[in-house]
Amino acid sequence: MQKLDNAKSINNSVQPNELPEYNLKLVYEISIVYEKNNKDSIAQYYATLLNIAEQCPYSGGKAVYMARGLVALFNDTIMYEDESNCLLQGYYRLQNVQPDIEENMGIRIIPNPANTFADVELNSSYEGICRIIITDIYSKKLSEQTFDCKSRQYRIKTEKYKSGVYNLKIQINDKIIKVARLIIAR
């Protein structure tokens, strides 16, 4: 608790000048309340978190992803339109075209948000080797694991990851099939 009180006083002393700094200050403030109490204690901040979560990450900063992790505690079905939001603000990004992606292949991640583990379940049967690649929000590869696709399920241990949003890429026989979001909340 002492560390959280220290973090709160440091956060209160920050004087933001730009939108990313303002967002970070708000998200840190709400995160401290969440860490001190529980999920219900931040329900009153849902509208604020959603407002930050729906911003373009290029203009709103890393707090956008942090806010998305907290919003997912209440509603994990929200899809964010980063391409549209960023395009409206003048941020352009070349699309990473991958013709081998199968649109109808589904996976489930249970639980999501996860704490110590997450089970990845394939909705269909496949032959071969399945590869799970976990990357951070900046597309930096954090881990790569393989399993036999016939089992249709694989448990990922998430203790080594910090709270946040991660991308989970599923490859079957070296073709990318699905990219999903894994949220870790502690």
Image (cartoon, helix red, strand yellow):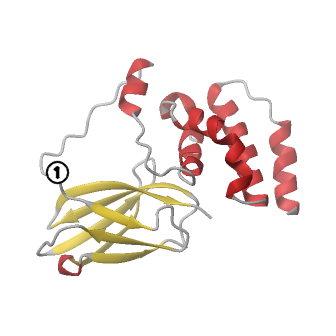
Where is residue 73, by image quadrant? bottom right
Pick the residue in front: 76 or 84: 76
Left or right: where 1 falls relative to 80: right
**Pointer 1: what residue?**
101
Left or right: where 146 falls relative to 53: left
Image x and y of residue 18, in percent: 66, 24
Pick the residue in front: 9 or 109: 109
Image x and y of residue 175, in percent: 16, 59
Image x and y of residue 146, in percent: 27, 75
Q: Amino acid at mark 1?
A: Ile
User: Quadrant of the image for the N terminus?
Assistant: bottom right
**Which residue is found at the position 13% from the left and 75% from the top?**
128
Q: Secondary structure at mark 1?
A: loop
Counting the numbered discs, the total is: 1
Image x and y of residue 68, in percent: 53, 45
Left or right: where 183 falls relative to 93: right
**Which residue is found at the position 19% from the left and 76% from the top?**
149
Pick the residue in front: 150 or 169: 150
**Which residue is found at the position 68% from the left and 47% from the top?**
43
Q: Specify few, some or many for label 1: CA neighbours under 10 Å numbering under 14, 14-19, or 20 or more.
A: some
**Which residue is found at the position 27% from the left and 62% from the top?**
170
The correct choice, above or below, for 97 with respect to 165 in the image is: above
Left or right: where 101 falls relative to 154: left
User: Quadrant of the image for the C terminus?
Assistant: bottom right
